[in-house]
Image: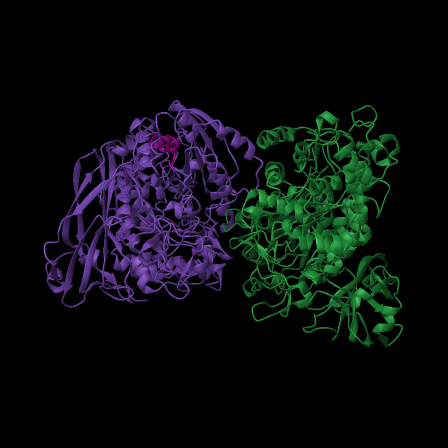
Chain colours: A green, B purple
Amino acid sequence: MTTLLALACLALATNVYAAFPDCANGPLANNTVCDTSATPLERATALISLFTLEEKINNTGNTAPGVPRLGLPAYQWWQEALHGLADSPGVIFSESGEFSYATSFPQPILMGAAFDDALINSVATVVSTEGRAFNNANRSGLDFWTPNINPFRDPRWGRGQETPGEDPFHLQSYVYNLITGLQGGLDPAYKRVVATCKHYAAYDLENWMGNVRYGFDALVSLQDLSEFYTRSFQTCARDANVGAFMCSYNAVNGVPSCANSYLLQDILREHWNWTNEDQWVTSDCDAVQNIYEPHYYAPTRAQTVADALNAGTDLDCGTYYPDFLGVAYNESLINVTTLNRALIRQYASLVKLGYFDPAENQPYRQLGWENVSTPYAEQLAYTAAVEGITLLKNDGTLPLSKDIKTLALIGPWANATTQMQGNYYGVAPYLISPLMAAEALNYTVLYSSGPGIDDPTTPTYPAAFEVASQADAIIYAGGIDTTVEAEAMDRYTIDWPGVQPDFIDLLSQLGKPLIVLQMGGGQIDDSCLIPNTNVNAIIWGGYPGQSGGAALMDIIAGNAAPAGRLPITQYPIEYVNEVPMTDMSLRPSATNPGRTYMWYTGTPIFEFGYGLHYTNFSATLSAPSAASYDVQSLVAACAGAAYLDLCPFEAYTVNVTNTGSTHASDYVSLLFVAGEHGPTPYPNKVLVAYDRLHGVEPLSSQTTTLNLTLGSLARRDDYGNTVLYPGEYTLLLDVEPQSTQSFTLTGESTVLDYWPQP
Amino acid sequence: MTTLLALACLALATNVYAAFPDCANGPLANNTVCDTSATPLERATALISLFTLEEKINNTGNTAPGVPRLGLPAYQWWQEALHGLADSPGVIFSESGEFSYATSFPQPILMGAAFDDALINSVATVVSTEGRAFNNANRSGLDFWTPNINPFRDPRWGRGQETPGEDPFHLQSYVYNLITGLQGGLDPAYKRVVATCKHYAAYDLENWMGNVRYGFDALVSLQDLSEFYTRSFQTCARDANVGAFMCSYNAVNGVPSCANSYLLQDILREHWNWTNEDQWVTSDCDAVQNIYEPHYYAPTRAQTVADALNAGTDLDCGTYYPDFLGVAYNESLINVTTLNRALIRQYASLVKLGYFDPAENQPYRQLGWENVSTPYAEQLAYTAAVEGITLLKNDGTLPLSKDIKTLALIGPWANATTQMQGNYYGVAPYLISPLMAAEALNYTVLYSSGPGIDDPTTPTYPAAFEVASQADAIIYAGGIDTTVEAEAMDRYTIDWPGVQPDFIDLLSQLGKPLIVLQMGGGQIDDSCLIPNTNVNAIIWGGYPGQSGGAALMDIIAGNAAPAGRLPITQYPIEYVNEVPMTDMSLRPSATNPGRTYMWYTGTPIFEFGYGLHYTNFSATLSAPSAASYDVQSLVAACAGAAYLDLCPFEAYTVNVTNTGSTHASDYVSLLFVAGEHGPTPYPNKVLVAYDRLHGVEPLSSQTTTLNLTLGSLARRDDYGNTVLYPGEYTLLLDVEPQSTQSFTLTGESTVLDYWPQP
């Protein structure tokens, strides 16, 4: 019977889901769920109490049929919006005209490189506005399974492009601003949309040497779990009040994430106080099934769904819940209270979205097509790309001399369109390739695609050289794209793929100005290009979105100035031979050179935070208020703080001077802490604050304030506890330190946060 | 300038290449090349002597522009025909009507499973007939870059499907019959077409953990090189007189194959006497370029092309030769004699194809569309599939009872069409899927695709179970296909991919007759299916070609009887964790459980040569003529033999009886040698002869003769020498031995063939 019912659900797949229940005249009109004076918990509980057991079970999958007899519409819980509304089961673009497109921002890895929290908040606000507009047109639900906020642990990861980078503090700051933008604040009267922090936890491997995400068991120490893998999720749950979480495909220390009560209950709900009535957990799609196979964690399918539901996975993206929860119930593996709890969380969430309330009182219900892809949104997509694009090498050739009139645009990214969107994308209003942008700037443009991304062959060589020989300057746009880094596809090499290095070398022998655009989300080792004096400049462009070509060409032409910083380490090619991707540990060991800029013991090609400008900057950091602080006094001063790690320590002023005379430019202040304090080994340094200043004029200064908390100074012990330690502390401003300050902490180590023990 | 010339070549890419030179009235009419009384060497030499240096260099790539001023047409050297004419630069199918299709046979891995040399010769004859017909219509050249005759060393190899299997003797016998079929005999007046044995040598890795074929250095012992990696190539060159070789992407022991004079000169030309004036070596496509990058073997591009040409690579599939041989010549890195040699070989080959001769005297020039996809060819494609399909499990459910009227066909292969062609395929006249074939057999067929090959998701479960619940029996058609095993893509797991095991298990719980078709070229571990008594039968179907569905369904319905044998070992899933794919050694060690049935120390899921029938057979092997033989006497009796290893030892009669009373069936006699002789370790056993008997009637017998040579008994020493050793020898008939015979060899070890030392 469940089979037939599920068939009925599937039949909905081509329909529209976003119809609202009729609380005025429908069967529910007199139910408490339609009573706006009742609490969300009361309203959701009243609704669920009307469901039969079968109706409850039928509504536990992402494609929920609703309850027709109650006038409760079908609902699709699965919408995607990684960097703009994205094709997904619940987002339906029209074929033409209104609602046929939406703003497509750069991939998060490039937006991460902007190190601009306000930008992220603005982008998220646009995305949720456009989501509401689509929802009002019955073209989207209100729950979005974004962001992907796993730290980018290994350069091989195919989905690293979906994240803001490798640094936990950076991810925390980014995700806080993203979620408050998407949801409309910390506790709004009506949420704009519900965001979903994924993939909880320690998910950052797709398919590496037969280790497939669906069955991978991530072995993670409590120290790494607390310090690295869950920091961004803590911010989602504890600080940003995100509406939903997604448990991940992988297991953590032997227990599949979606059956992992230590992760879902002990840490997420109890330790992080993520206990609002409207906060729910979905599985990644078919992750519940994967508990059975290929994790082989539970002996039967009924036990599988019981394990997941009892552990705290409220919704199954898939069909295992609707297919097998009935069996589990008959076998007494679940009880109805747990089932009700899951459904109440989901429907309380819809209550907080205004799903059961009159439209006329809700501003978001008034949004329409005129609020999609507005001139502001279009400009913001362009700005996001400009801010993220990162200059890695420049001998002065950039910005291009005005004498250069004819450009050869060559390479597999030279006329990129959807390529610029990476993955999880929708229909953009337009896609401005580098080629189109160069033509719009009135260059005479000669184009040849050259060899493909991973192409070992040379059939297009001659045409490319013909083009290059006729140009004043050559722009080679290549690197990687989603043909080599993708969902379900990790990399095995971080070299430039295919024949590209050979091809660029041949181009360089022409002796013309040569700019290399290194595109894609993961880094590739540029060391073959750096010593080549005929490669005049290298720009990393990520996946820059709908206006990506315009942003790149405006920087190249000097209409915009680059100030992005690498949000990830660019490792040398041998890195992939030095540590298996399956090794989750961060700290260096005999079989691991260390992961991220914090722990890597080798010499990176380009360091985390690296990025050049068209001008020079000097920056100074204000002095600490004291040379020494007592740990106990610092903690005592925080009495009454909800969370000691968030209690302020000191604020530092950064004074930034553009010492050049020609180019205004943004500047990102990155503040790191280093020093001997806490358990060994000590990290190289740790990012604790950042801010982006905009448009610092030539020979002018701006200031910003960087706020440190006790957590900025704390480290994690072997149990995952957050501890403030006595010792030496040095503050380092910028990657090549522009300014340093030091102080000491004295007294006894003090725990700021006790990590739950499994 | 070379760039512009190469551009001119590229412009030809959409044209037709197969026009013949006009030897009657064209500029060459009075040149010796048009004189049919001259030798091929004289004729080719005369032609080349007319070329300028630039014209010579321009004609060193696969897309040869010819010499217009001499009336020498452009020629495309690159045609593919792995299992029928295949889309490739030189094979142009028309959009409709005549020459819009050609016969598409099963992939070699399935034809290998037939163990039927006569079948292979027939298939190759059809392919070359169709190639000639296309050539006469200006739709193909006459040089085909087939077969792929590397042994299938590792189950992960993405191109193993293109080979007949893992056993060197099997490959030798197969390739001899294939080449004589393609070329029209050993030394025909006119060759039908020119075949190309590829990829020489030790090429069997695509892309595994960042080890990419273009830059991989295969470290191979002389013993393994002689015994395993080059046996089939020896047959191509020394015995079958193949017209062309292709050197491979990889290096062998530090030297890229296409720059490897040890491989190309010492072994191929000198040791194997492959020295006809018309025998030439092409590079794999862009393998010359790969010598420069990513092998980084030569310091400059000029040195790269010189290294390749001087080592004996006559033709560059690519543009490095035409682009850089001029520079190499100017730098005195090559001389014109070497350049002439390469060109003479190629044009002498065209002479032997009748390219410069009057059409009217050449039978092959009379072939036309009426010779393509004839009823005979169509029947042969069906027969080839039937003969290869291999029955791995059967509890008596197959052939299906006549009471079964309604079939559920489920799975990603159930309605396979082009999927059945694997890779390197052309347009087939038709593609009969299992679904179409079942309908043609008047079953009531219920179809559901179920989950995809590597699909972790379940959205199609309900529909599939609905279908299954209504059927009398279920056929699940799945396994792998070119989405998981392909050129440029090795596997990391040999498990059933995705959710298929879970899905099949759910189907099996319905308790209906369930037949599983395990499709694809590489094996997958069936151990999840074997103990499940509700999985009634397992059939391996490879990539069965244009009539694949008909062949499968006729076997299932009992209209044909299965007699294929696995041409490769089916390893357990842990095998891929026990030895890196990059380890080329065959023999077991602490880090290698051994490769192929000869050396594997573990227990295979299904052994090489395994295959069930619909009846039972008994088979007996005639006794040796003696209990003991003296090595020196055996060798002395071969005085005057061109090659001692081919000198006959003894012929054995096999008497095969179908002991069943209901089904006629083919039977493959596989004869192995085992025993303690020669260097340790000893192989488990070694295949030395095989033959396929056709249509052995119930309660009837047939006999065949299996011929052994001295080479059948020989082994390789550490230097690669082929040596006849004293010791114990046991002959084993069939995988589960039906009959064994033993004898001893006495006397001194004697070398039958001295292997060239590097």
User: Is A446 inside the magenta-drawn segment?
Assistant: no
User: Is A146 on the left or on the right of B726, as rendered?
Assistant: right
Task: Pick the quarter of the image with the C terminus of chain B.
Answer: bottom left
Q: Is residue B63 above or below residue B596?
A: above
Q: Quadrant of residue A69?
A: top right
- How far across and how far down the image is residue A338, in percent? 70, 43
User: Is B649 on the left or on the right of A329, as rendered?
Assistant: left
A556 and A150: which is toward the camera: A150
User: Is B340 on the left or on the right of A281, as rendered?
Assistant: left
B185 and A405: which is toward the camera: B185
Could you tell me how many numbered marks the image carries? 0
- How far across and how far down the image is residue A150, in percent? 68, 54
- How far across and how far down the image is residue A626, in percent? 88, 75
What residue sits 59% from the left and 45% below the top? Answer: A304
- How far across and how far down the image is residue B376, in percent? 29, 29
Q: Is residue B10 above or below residue A170?
A: above
Magenta-colored segment: predominant secondary structure: helix
Q: Is residue A393 visible?
A: no
B211 and B13: which is toward the camera: B211
What residue sits 52% from the left and 35% below the top? Answer: B450
Q: Is residue A71 visible?
A: yes
Q: Is residue A474 above or below residue B480?
A: below
User: Is A298 on the left or on the right of A660, as rendered?
Assistant: left
Region of the chain picked out in magenta, as a range: B544-556
Q: Is residue A210 above or below residue A193?
A: below
A105 and B130: which is toward the camera: A105
User: Is B546 inside the magenta-drawn segment?
Assistant: yes
